[in-house]
Image: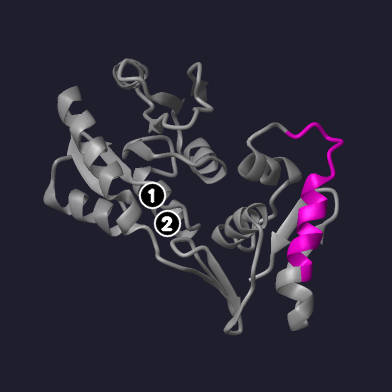
Amino acid sequence: MLSTLDGAEGSEGTVRLLVVEDEPKMARLIRTALQNQGHAIDSVDNGPEAVWMATECDYDAIVLDVVIPPPDGFEVCRTLRERGRWAPILLLTARDGVQDRVNGLDAGADDYLPKPFSFDELSARLRALMRRRVSERPAQLVVGDLTLDPATRQVTRSGTVVPLSPKGFSLLELFMRRSGEVLSRAVLLEHAWDFAYDGESNVVDVYVRYLRDKVDRPFGRESIETVWGAGYRLNP
């Protein structure tokens, strides 16, 4: 079950967090504590919704309980990392054994907080994770012979620099972070323009043609595919 608090879409400077906790009282306490600090909170109570939300949305951090309806927190964490989703993950669990901590970190978690815990410690750990986030994210994205460097905002294909507009760069970065996935026009529009897709705008189609003219056709490639009735996909 998804619970989205007012303001969860966030604004510039707003910290957006995903809370994954299946125990209603604990979920409510965590949401309230974090919301009272001014954060925008989305909340789900099972593994499939956690994977979907964390894949579709960009979060500053994720608070993830290990013991949730399957897939469990370890598997959710592992799946997100395999999909190139690098939001910091803080695992919560009643388990305090060393092996469980090792399993969580091996799955790609950034930190581990056993229950019961104080909300002051939870907040402090989240702040520490978000401070480290920029330096710990992958420096470059590579799909085949296509490379994108978020730090320098440079794109190359087969070693040749490909100049892109800011919107083109933003769209290509999303395609590369989620290569192989079909991305709807609504997802692409929300990512690059921050407003809802109205079903009539063709701005996404225009920019996809622009990207093809920049990163595909000059190199004899057809990597950005149209999936009819669904959207577009970067074929890895």
Magenta segment range?
Answer: 197-213
Colour scheme in the image? Answer: one colour
Can you tell which mark lies on residue 81?
2
The location of residue 165, given as percent across then percent down, is 66, 58
- Callout 1: helix, strand or loop? helix
The answer to whether residue 150 shows anywhere in this view is yes
Relative placement, left or right, of 99 versus 131 is left
What type of secondary structure mainly makes up the magenta span? helix
Q: Residue at x 71, y 60 (%)?
A: 233
Quadrant in the picture for residue 151: bottom left
The location of residue 45, given as percent across then percent down, is 44, 28
Identify the residue position indicated by label 1 in the image.
77
Q: Amino acid at mark 1?
A: Cys
Does 58 appear above or below 107? Answer: above
Relative placement, left or right, of 193 versus 115 is right
Does 24 appear above or below 199? Answer: above
